[in-house]
Image (cartoon, helix red, strand yellow):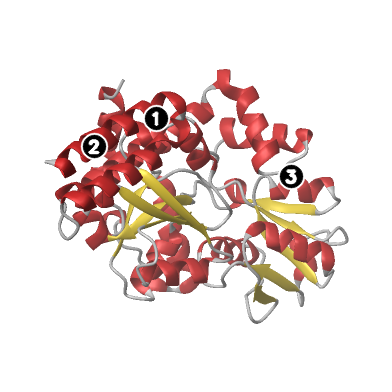
Amino acid sequence: MKLLCRFLFLLILACTSLELHPNSWAKRHDDVILSAAKDLNPSSSAISQELQASKVKLLTLLGRPLQVSVAESHGLFAKYGVTLETENLPNSDELRSALAAGKGDLAYLAVDNAVAMVELAHQDIVIVMGGEGSQNELIAQPEIKSIQDLRGKTLIVDAPNTAYALQMKKILLLSGLQAGKDYEMKAYGATPQRLVAMRENKSFAGSMLGPPSSIVAKHAGFVSLGTVQDLIGPYQAAGFFGERSWVAKNRETLISFLAAIIDAQRWLMAPDNKPQVLELMTNQMHLAPDVAAKSYESLMTKPGGFAKNALFDLAGFRNVLKLRAEVEGSWGGHPPSPEKYYDASCYNDALEKTKSKP
């Protein structure tokens, strides 16, 4: 009886803290309830199991995604009953390895990485939602005037056999240049790291960069030799994916997490919120005001930027698979159906959940 009274007292305390600390309520609520639950039954508390099931660990590559920051600062994860932990990895190889080793539940990364995990590492991965298209450009050193000037040069990528490296290979193939024969590719890490490397080492002739890095690069005198939108077409870039076993076991938690991200993406893209989004970009991404303004315009209003309701672009994903087939020779040059890698059911339920949740 004493333990039950303590549990009820702590529950009331957790609820009261919502008024005092709304942004940190979810964590405090979980900590308090878990503590009380352990007192009631430290070995097998149903409350403890339920709260543990509501937690998601997200692996990211380029710091904290804007959607995640918005969902946290606006209490959207708490609204849907989810607590989130994030870990930022320096490159896609390490991120894929961490996901495969069970060191995270979901990844937010270019979805071609999910395809690579299935086909190259034989991991049972499924993509559950989109997020962003691709506005990448082939950015080169100031003295490079054409793609032909890249012959014999070294180009840097995140990983040589996934996502944006395949974009680069395709763009250069259109001009008759083949990787390993006409130019060298060197793995160097995520987009901001590659821009820093190009600034510090002039022997790195070019790389695929997207906003805001591409905008910063052009301000610094680097040149654009072509865009993905113009040369390749629609491309499904960043999205959420994870192990099918985790998705199946944690379906309701996943749906709630996706619902929070959808709400956050809507907020980001709403024109009325532009001043707050610009402030977020300048503070979180450490962008100069003019770069933040151009990044906003590109990412929020133009093709290849943030997708309405975080919608997965099936046509863009077919292009992702087509690119892997053409450039890497996967599947004998004949890409499979997108449904082999993408399951829309959790996203559809999350979208409905956002409509019913006030």
Q: CA distance from mark 2 to mark 1?
A: 30 Å
- Residue 320 location, x and y as percent? 45, 57
Q: Dot 3: within a 10 Å radius of its alpha carbon, few (fewer than 14), some, or many (20 or more) residues?
A: many
Dot 2 falls on a residue whose secondary structure is helix
User: On the image, numbered disc 2 is attached to which residue?
Assistant: 349
- Residue 342 location, x and y as percent? 30, 53
Q: Nearer the viewer, residue 294 or 99?
A: 99
Left or right, 354 with reference to 175: left
Q: Is residue 307 visible?
A: no
For the point 48% across and 66% down, which residue is it? 95
Q: Nearer the viewer, residue 299 or 288?
A: 288
For the point 83% across and 66% down, which residue is it? 200
Q: Nearer the viewer, residue 336 or 284?
A: 284
Q: Earlier in the sequence, mark 2 or mark 1?
A: 1
Dividing the picture into quarters, in which one does residue 203 lie? bottom right
User: On the image, numbered disc 3 is attached to which residue?
Assistant: 215
Q: Dot 2: within a 10 Å radius of its alpha carbon, few (fewer than 14), some, or many (20 or more) residues?
A: some
For the point 49% across and 27% down, which residue is it? 267
Foreground tag (2 vs 1): 1
Q: CA distance from mark 1 to mark 3?
A: 43 Å
Q: CA distance from mark 2 to mark 3?
A: 37 Å
